[in-house]
């Protein structure tokens, strides 16, 4: 593996065309890189701010190879990029880690992997048919959550099972699923780290995260006392995961803070919504440090630059509040340029730098 830095002026390929790609491309442009987006959707909000765009399915081997030939390094902003076609990328380095993509795409593989690294997930069992579901319910009990192993995000592909009766109404229809015990938590938080090409690891302050209908609604830094007490153990695990994967770039692990310590929920092998506050609130944002890492540049400092930061997502028609949000001069408004407002769609976010602790 080459460890030579990829110099400003080079082209960074980004697989995925959403808002994470958009913010990565903006950070890359600040450092003098060109970005080339590869995404299947024509109305990519990342392509709008990038130098080049290949609009094609992820499985198109010919166009993937051509894209790779035009890039000096490739990264991804979407963790459900199919892994098999990535072999067509050839010699162009693909960072953060193909192995991390493979693991994070399957909730079962992810939980087993993290358990192997010493982490504690919620009790879980794989479910592929009615018999396995009954066994899982007997072993784990209710309440619990049945989740699709693949392609679930923002609370999609999840069914809450409050009592065995709820289970009776479900048809599993051959889906590969996982049943998890419901975790009794005091708070949710994330650990976001960046690992450089030379193995150096830096962490941002952990945000305390609130979700509504399975979608992140607010991240606040610093987190409350019940979270901060559990951050060192969670960081240790995240660093072990990054090390085991030979990871290069930004990695996120989400946790529940419980009476028995941090319980691992899921990992995202990429920049994360709960790290958007770092654009204004940290010395170096998650987006800039991801670009620095994948290009083999020295990492920037990750410290919080104010006493506290709050980031609120603008979901669905909340984005229509932009005039009111801009009327407050302390707000940093980010709109992703998505044309169509749908309920549950992440349209933007707003960050406030605070002078006091809020949680
Ligand atoms: P996920 O897509 O798995 O991150 O789930 C979205 C949100 O649902 C989480 O951030 C939690 O708020 C909630 N959730 C998911 N799994 C569990 C669980 N096992 N116990 C309690 N809450 C959960």
Image (cartoon, helix red, strand yellow):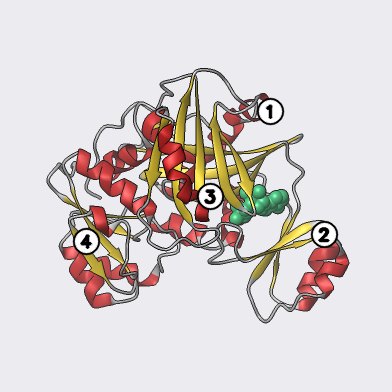
- x and y percentages locating residue 268 in the rendered image: 49, 51
Asked if disc 2 and disc 4 are in contact, CB closer than 8 Å, the reply is: no
- Between disc 2 and disc 4, the foreground one is 2
Is there a contact, CB below 8 Å, between mark 2 and mark 3? Answer: no
How crowded pointer 3 is (Cα within 10 Å; few <14, some 14-19, many 20+) is rated as: many
Where does label 1 land, which residue? 226
Local SS, label 1? helix
Q: CA distance from mark 1 to mark 3?
A: 21 Å
Residue assigned mark 3: 267
Quadrant position of residue 119? top right
* Residue 91: assigned label: 4
Q: Secondary structure at mark 3?
A: strand
Q: Nearer the viewer, residue 237 or 206?
A: 206
Percent coordinates x, y for residue 147 in the rendering? 66, 64
Which residue is tagged 2?
A: 162
Q: Earlier in the sequence, mark 2 or mark 3?
A: 2
Marks 1 and 4: which is nearer the front?
1
């Amino acid at each position: 593996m080459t460890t030579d830095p990829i110099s400003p002026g080079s082209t960074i390929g980004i697989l995925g065309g959403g808002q994470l790609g958009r913010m990565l491309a903006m950070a890359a442009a600040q450092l003098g890189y060109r970005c080339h987006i590869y995404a299947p959707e024509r109305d990519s909000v990342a392509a709008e701010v990038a130098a080049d765009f290949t609009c094609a399915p992820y499985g198109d081997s010919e166009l993937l190879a051509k894209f790779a030939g035009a890039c000096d390094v490739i990264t991804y902003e979407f963790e459900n990029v199919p892994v098999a076609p990535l072999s067509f990328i050839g010699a162009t380095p693909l960072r953060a880690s193909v192995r991390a993509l493979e693991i994070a795409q399957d909730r079962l593989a992810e939980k087993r992997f993290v358990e192997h690294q010493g982490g504690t997930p919620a009790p879980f069992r794989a479910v592929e048919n009615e018999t396995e579901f009954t066994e899982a319910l007997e072993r784990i009990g209710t309440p619990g959550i049945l989740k699709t192993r693949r392609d679930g995000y923002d609370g999609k592909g999840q069914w809450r099972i409050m009592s065995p009766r709820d289970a009776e109404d479900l048809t599993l229809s051959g889906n590969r699923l996982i049943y998890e015990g419901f975790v009794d938590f005091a708070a949710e938080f994330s650990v976001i780290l960046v690992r450089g090409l030379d193995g150096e690891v830096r962490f941002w302050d952990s945000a305390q995260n609130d979700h509504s209908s399975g979608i992140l609604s607010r991240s606040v830094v610093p987190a409350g006392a019940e979270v901060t007490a559990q951050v060192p153990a969670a960081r240790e695990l995240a660093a072990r995961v990054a090390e085991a994967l030979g990871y290069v770039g930004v990695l996120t692990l989400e946790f529940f803070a419980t009476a028995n310590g941090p319980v691992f929920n899921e990992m995202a092998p990429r920049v994360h919504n709960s790290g958007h506050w770092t654009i204004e609130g940290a010395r170096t944002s998650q987006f800039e440090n991801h670009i620095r890492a994948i290009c083999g540049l020295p990492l920037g400092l990750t410290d919080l630059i104010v006493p506290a930061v709050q980031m609120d997502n603008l979901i669905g028609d909340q984005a229509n509040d932009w005039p009111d949000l801009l009327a407050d001069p302390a707000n940093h408004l980010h709109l992703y340029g998505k044309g169509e407002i749908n309920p549950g769609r992440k349209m933007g976010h707003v960050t406030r730098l605070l002078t006091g602790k809020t949680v």
